[in-house]
Amino acid sequence: MARRILCAGPTAIAPAVLDRMTQASTNPDLDPAYLSFHQQVIKKYQRLLNTEATTFMMLGEAMVALEGAVVSLVEPGDRVLVLSNGVYGQGFADYVRFVGGEPVVFSQDHRHGLDLDRLAAFLAEDHDFALATMVHCETPTGVTNDLAGLAGLLNRYGILSIVDSVSGIGGEKVDFDAFGLDCILCGSQKVLSAPTGLALVTLSKRAEAKIADRQKEVPSFYLNFKNYYAYDDPAFAFPYTMSEHLTAALDEALDRLLAQDYLSLHARYARLTRETVRASGLSLYALDHFASTVTAVCLPEGLSASQLLDAMRAKDILISKGVGPMADRLFRIGHMGNNISEDNFRALFAALDQSFTDLGYPLDQSLEETFTAFLADDRF
Ligand SMILES: *Cc1c(COP(=O)(O)O)cnc(C)c1O
């Protein structure tokens, strides 16, 4: 039996995506055809953001882009508003400190989306910020923040935004220009369902100007965004050797995603998952702003995430546990990208039913039966 991946990332990679890697056969440093191919892949990716703004890829995990954004955009002494309702949101404060910026954390309970009224009231008192950092979808909790609303508030005061949408783009609506965002970051291995190793960055003109107008040099060469887009000679389009294999895989993965009504698909599976889980007697961790890409579920008292994950892995199904303080109290289902199929979700819910029973915590109502009934229900 093939292993099924239903984690909150890295997600399941389609065989066609892996096959494409085996067909890549040029030298990206020397072959001009590679550059035009690379640019076409960027154009495909930009469709997910509804933008033609400057976009480039770096080699590395998404963290490379996250840290690169702070290193490139934040100058020593910049006050940076760190919007935090989760582990990733909070993490930006450290990056800001590392480069000599002054993080001011606007923090909120992890079970709710960032509250726009509270933020508006906060900004009315204090809006002397060069930038704000935020997370689109907090993968550890399954909460998706209202990017359009947040950017709208920040733009009233000319505060530039850095957005971690590593688990959002492709599953949540992003309208980079219309939302008025300045820097949005993604990784290849979540919703896009390509191999781990590409970090994607998109910048507004304002963000480019902030980088161009820096008083102090960017304190890094490798993470300096400018090296990836501010070149005169296309021969220097890539500061370092690109991975044509990863680019080819991403191209195929984007084709597969774009061939579907991907936003509706993610919203549907998110809703199916939430309603199925609720009917079973389990409760969701998020209380509002439910993510379309991941659902975090509270475990019954006495049952740990490790026990459940072990039982599921024995059935050849990988799900995620919690992160940070809730690591062992939650389990998470990634309805992301190529994880999504009826077959995968039936198998997932059947295995969860069995695991909860085997571990001594039988559910009120079978997840698999509920899911099957919901699939045939017009409401979904
Ligand atoms: C997965 C994830 C990251 C980190 O991505 P890596 O590629 O593992 O570095 C950052 N932010 C969010 C919201 C994520 O889901």
Image (tube, helix red, strand yellow):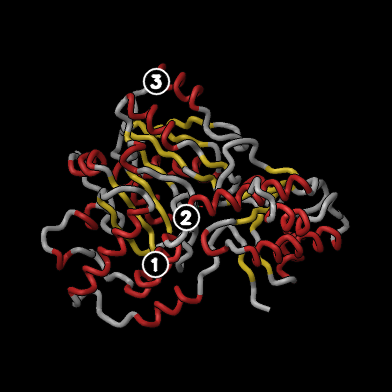
The answer to whether residue 204 is left or right of residue 369 is left
Which of the pair 177/379 is nearer the observer?
Answer: 379
Q: Is residue 124 left or right of residue 311?
A: left
The residue positioned 43% from the left and 62% from the top of the image is 259
Whether residue 184 is visible? yes
Type of amino acid under label 2 = Asp
Q: Secondary structure at mark 1?
A: helix
Q: Earlier in the sequence, mark 2 or mark 3?
A: 3
- Residue 86 falls in which quadrant of the image? top right
- State left or right for residue 368 relative to residue 98: right
- Residue 246, image x and y in percent? 38, 71
Label 1 to label 2, Cα distance in Å?
18 Å
Closest to the observer: 111 or 376? 376
Q: At 39% from the left edge and 41% from the top edge, which residue is drawn?
A: 96
**Which mark, residue 126?**
3
The residue positioned farthest toward the right in the image shown: 360
Amino acid of disc 3:
Asp
- Indicate the secondary structure of the residue bearing disc 2: loop
Judging by the rendered image, the residue that carries numbered circle 2 is 261
